[in-house]
C-alpha cells in the first residue's frame, strides 16, 4: 500500500462502527460515489482491500480525494438517507438511479369493530378508524414485522364476529382473545409502532420466547421464521427521522472544530448534505437555529466531519478530508 493508500485507510479507521452513509469525492469536490453501511468503518476500510464484486469501483478509488460520512441512528435510517440522496443526484459511479431497490410502504392499523388488524399498504388512504405508520423501506421486511406483531398481539381476531365467521371465532378462542380486548390490543400495537420502548421490548420478549421454545422443540424452520420477524420488527421500530410523513421544509446544521455540516430537509425528507470550513462564531450561530430534536444528530455528525482530517503533510499543512 502506497502513502496515499495508507493515509486513506487511516481516515477510514476514524469512522465509527455504526450505521450510516459515506461518499467519495474527487479533488474538485465532485461526488463520485455514495453508499450506505451497517458499519461505516468496516465497509469503508474495505475499499482499500479486495473489492470482490465491486471491482468496477477500482478506477473511482484512484480518483477519490475526499471522504465524508454521516452516522445514522439505525440501519433503516441509513437506508432512507442513501435513497433520498441518490434520488436528489446520482453520482457517476452509482448504478441505482432509483435510489435503492426497497419499496416504500406503510402500516395501516385499524381498530374498527368489524375489521381490526394491521396491513401493509403502498400509500396511506383515508379510512375511518384507521391510522397509518411510516413510511418504511422494504415491503418484505415490513410484512415480516407485521406478521410478528400480529402473532403476539392478534388484534385481527378481536373483532365483532359476523354470521359467516365461525372459523374466525374458533381461532379467536384458540388464541385467547375476545372483542372486549380489541381497544387495548389496538392501543398496544400503536404504542409499538410509535416506538414506545416498553411496548417494543415486551413484544420482542414474547417473540423471542416463542422462537426459543420452537428451537427447543426442534422446530427449526419455525424458529428461523420467528427470528426473521424479530429482525424485521427491529427494522420497523428503530429510530428513523430522515424521512417523515410530514412535508416540512427546514435546515439542520452542526458545527465542531472549524467544520460546519449542513443538511436540508425538504418535503419531510433529508435530501441534501454539504460540509465546509466555518469559523466558531458563525458556526455556533447557525447550529443554534437547528430544531432541538435534530441537535444531537447534527452535532454528532459535525464532530465526525471534523475528525475526518488528514495528518499534517510533509509540507506542514493540514488537508481536511483529503485522502
Image (cartoon, rainbow, N blue to C red):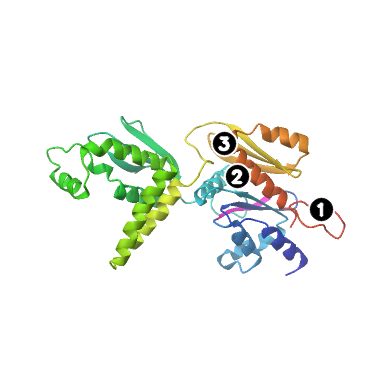
Where disc 1 sits, the SS reads loop
* Residue pictured at 18% horizontal, 50% vertical: 174
Q: Quadrant of residue 122?
A: top left
Is 180 colored magenta in this rendering?
no
Label annotation for residue 293? 3
- Give the quarter of the figure containing the N terminus: bottom right
* Residue pictured at 32% horizontal, 31% vertical: 127
Q: Which residue is mark 2?
A: 89
Mark 1 nearby-residue class (10 Å; few <14, some 14–19, many ≥20):
few
Where disc 3 sits, the SS reads helix
* Residue pictured at 26% horizontal, 42% vertical: 156
Disc 3/disc 1 C-alpha distance (Å): 33 Å
Q: Which marked residue is nearer to the observer: mark 2 or mark 1?
A: 1
Q: Which residue is mark 1?
A: 318
Mark 2 nearby-residue class (10 Å; few <14, some 14–19, many ≥20):
few
Report x, y in % for residue 274.
Answer: 67, 42
- Of residue 80 and residue 172, the one placed in the foreground of this image is 172
Tell me, yes or no, if residue 115 can be seen here.
no
Q: Which residues are magenta?
A: 31-37
Q: Which marked residue is nearer to the observer: mark 2 or mark 3?
A: 3
The mark nearer the N terminus, 2 or 3, is: 2
Disc 2/disc 3 C-alpha distance (Å): 27 Å
Amino acid at each position: 500500500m502506497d502513502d496515499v493508500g495508507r493515509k486513506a485507510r487511516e481516515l477510514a479507521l476514524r469512522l465509527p462502527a455504526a450505521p450510516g452513509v459515506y461518499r467519495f469525492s474527487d479533488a474538485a469536490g465532485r461526488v463520485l460515489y455514495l453508499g450506505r453501511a451497517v458499519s461505516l468503518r468496516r465497509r469503508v476500510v474495505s475499499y482499500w482491500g479486495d473489492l470482490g464484486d465491486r471491482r468496477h469501483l477500482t478506477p473511482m478509488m484512484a480518483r477519490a480525494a475526499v471522504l465524508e460520512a454521516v452516522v445514522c441512528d439505525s440501519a433503516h435510517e441509513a437506508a432512507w438517507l442513501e435513497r433520498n440522496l441518490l434520488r436528489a443526484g446520482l453520482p457517476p459511479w452509482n448504478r441505482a438511479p432509483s435510489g435503492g431497490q426497497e419499496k416504500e410502504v406503510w402500516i395501516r392499523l385499524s381498530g374498527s369493530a368489524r375489521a381490526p388488524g394491521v396491513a401493509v399498504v403502498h400509500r396511506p388512504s383515508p379510512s375511518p378508524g384507521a391510522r397509518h405508520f411510516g413510511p418504511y423501506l422494504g415491503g418484505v421486511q415490513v410484512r415480516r414485522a407485521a406478521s410478528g406483531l400480529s402473532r403476539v398481539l392478534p388484534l385481527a381476531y378481536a373483532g365483532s364476529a359476523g354470521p359467516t365467521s365461525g372459523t374466525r371465532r374458533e381461532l379467536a378462542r384458540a388464541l385467547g382473545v375476545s372483542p372486549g380486548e380489541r381497544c387495548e390490543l389496538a392501543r398496544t400495537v400503536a404504542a409499538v409502532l410509535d416506538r414506545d420502548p416498553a411496548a417494543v421490548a415486551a413484544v420482542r420478549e414474547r417473540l423471542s420466547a416463542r422462537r426459543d421454545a420452537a428451537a427447543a422443540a426442534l422446530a427449526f424452520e419455525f424458529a428461523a421464521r420467528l427470528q426473521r420477524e424479530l429482525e424485521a420488527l427491529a427494522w420497523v421500530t428503530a429510530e428513523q427521522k430522515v424521512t417523515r410523513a410530514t412535508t416540512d421544509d427546514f435546515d439542520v446544521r452542526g458545527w465542531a472544530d472549524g467544520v460546519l455540516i449542513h443538511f436540508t430537509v425538504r418535503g419531510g425528507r433529508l435530501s441534501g448534505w454539504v460540509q465546509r470550513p466555518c469559523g466558531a462564531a458563525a458556526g455556533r450561530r447557525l447550529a443554534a437555529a437547528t430544531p432541538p430534536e435534530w441537535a444531537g444528530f447534527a452535532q454528532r455528525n459535525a464532530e465526525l466531519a471534523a475528525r475526518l482530517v488528514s495528518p499534517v503533510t510533509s509540507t506542514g499543512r493540514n488537508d481536511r478530508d483529503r485522502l
